[in-house]
Image (cartoon, rainbow, N blue to C red):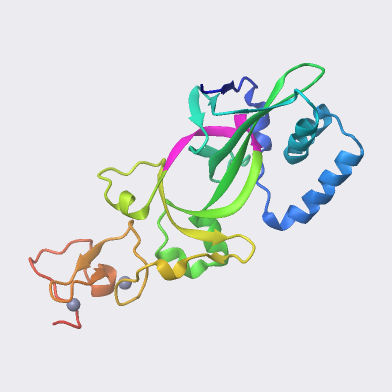
Amino acid sequence: MIKSLQCSQGADYRRFMKRQSPESSATIKKQIHKRLQKRWTIRELYKEKSWKTLVKVGLQTKGLYEEYDTIKVQGQVLSVGDSVLINSGDQYDEDYVGTIKQILSIKEPTTAKLICLCRIQWYMRKSEIIKSQPKCSEWISEQELFITNHQEYILAQSIIASCKILSCSEYQELDEIESTIYFNRLEWDLQKKQFGNMDALQQFCFCFQPVNPDRQYIQCDSCKNWYHFECVGIKNGKYNQNEFYCSKCQ
Ligand SMILES: [Zn+2]
Ligand SMILES: [Zn+2]
């Protein structure tokens, strides 16, 4: 039987969502320790948005903690494993993207109201990656996401909608591109600020870069290699001849 949670809280807490960086995890540990020692109530922890401590306290007290398979939020039923867009709390920032790893509720003992939480595995977007790797801007697609090993609890009502994360080849086979369809081919190490498995990527063209599905490519009829339009001097995105030979094969 599927156990389902109805997220009935208002949307007022949505704007308070702020993703934590893993660098701050030592500070967070200290905070959790302090709050546990001071025996903060569920209500206080909720106000402080201290979700990790809240889950710890919930687990320690019988009858407060419950886990679920699905959650209904913003009129959509979402399951563990689904990918979602999450309000970043800043109207100028892009929505966050993550995968639901766990759905749970903590009961506030005095009011019996349920605090609905999801544990989320974060993905990073292009805009975040190129802050530390600006040279990669050319081959990273606007719809590309980078999986991280960073997980965090969020309030369920900060989820905006579900989205799809495909493999790179699945994404390239799509006939129509939608704004909520992304792809993932690389890991991103948040601590080291570098890619986890970059060697696995095939390089193309004279500029020796991984494929970017946003850009136009042409295949050489002799060596069968793929080249960027710009790199072989094709202008205005148009090539009218039947055959193409790269400068190495001409
Ligand atoms: Zn090129
Ligand atoms: Zn060639």
Q: Quadrant of residue 44?
A: top right
Residue bounds of the magenta highlight: 154-164
Quadrant of the image where one finds ligand 1: bottom left
Is there any visible trace of residue 95 in the rendered image?
no
- The front one of 153 and 220 is 153
Report the side of 26 relative to 116 (left or right).
right
Quadrant where the C terminus is found in the figure: bottom left
Number of marks present in the image shown: 0
Magenta stretch, overall SS? strand
Which residue lies at the image location 19% right of the left edge and 68% below the top edge? 219
Q: Is 156 rendered above or below residue 224?
A: above
Which residue lies at the image location 21% right of the left edge and 66% below the top edge? 218
- The front one of 59 and 71 is 59
Residue 158 in magenta? yes
Instruction: Give the percent coordinates (x, y) of residue 62.
Output: 78, 25
Report the side of 73 relative to 62 (left or right).
left
Instruction: Give the percent coordinates (x, y) of residue 9.
Output: 65, 22
Which residue lies at the image location 51% right of the left edge and 67% below the top edge? 134
Report the side of 24 relative to 14 (left or right).
right
User: Residue pushed farthest left?
Assistant: 242
Q: Quadrant of residue 243?
A: bottom left
Residue 59 in magenta? no
Instruction: Give the percent coordinates (x, y) of residue 203.
Output: 34, 71
Instruction: Give the percent coordinates (x, y) of residue 23.
Output: 71, 58
- The front one of 108 and 143 is 108
